[in-house]
Amino acid sequence: MAVRKLGPGDFRVMPWKNGAGSTTELAIEPPGATLAGGFLWRVSMATVAESGPFSSFPGFDRTLLLLEGQGLELDYGAHGRALLPGPLEPARFRGEWATRGRLLGGPCRDFNVMSRRGAIEHEVNIIYPGPEPSGLPEAPTVLVFCCAGTAGVTGLADGLRAGELLRIDGGGGSGIMVRAGHEAAPLAVVALRPARSPAFQHK
């Protein structure tokens, strides 16, 4: 099992695929892959400063949640809509859907996970502060993002600070315990596994 903590110095800032803004890439597989060259999965965050279209990513499943902001509506056209009324409520959708985001109360900052359909499945969960530490899911790759404040992590003396990402490869993530530091400091946990089931179906 390999455990690595990543911070702002490890992240890449780049334009959105549609050129309408910029995104901070937290991690991508394979490492160093590009949007043009193809990838298996990618985790990023971005500031949505104005309403407008999302970039198209055919063949990918996406999960989006807000880290900051007063709400965002996702309009999938013929596939319906999803409302993100505030932080940490994930919405899942297909990357090829013609999606538009409408801000409900000013700019937002989002957290975005994408995985190639048929190759990788992803699962996103939120760990909130509580009296006891929480275990992590068992998966070949597990990512833990500190949304705010600080978090304690088994075997990591200085823990995680806001904006830092813990990457665990090789399985064994369930042997690591994490604990969010206070009520305003939840953790976003992403489990990435080889696809075993039929392609995601929107409900």
Image: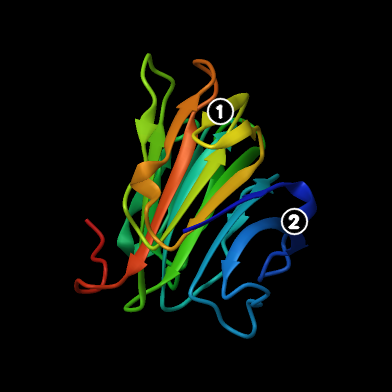
Q: Identify the disc placed on residue 151.
A: 1
**Disc 2 on helix, strand or loop?**
helix
- Residue nearest the observer in this picture, 51 or 33: 33
- Residue 76 x, y percent position in the rendering: 40, 59
In the rendered image, which quarter is residue 122 located in? Answer: bottom left
Mark 1 or mark 2: whose residue is earlier in sequence: 2
User: Taking the image as drawn, is residue 99 in sight?
Assistant: no
The amino acid pointed to by label 2 is Asp
The amino acid pointed to by label 1 is Ala
Distance from Cα at disc 1 to Cα at disc 2? 19 Å
Q: Identify the disc placed on residue 10.
A: 2
Instruction: Locate the C terminus by quadrant.
Output: bottom left
Q: Identify the disc placed on residue 56.
A: none
- Residue nearest the observer in this picture, 127 or 175: 175
Left or right of 149 on screen, residue 78: left
**Disc 1 on helix, strand or loop?**
strand
Left or right of 61 on screen, residue 199: left
- Residue nearest the observer in this picture, 202 or 3: 3
Count the marks: how many?
Answer: 2
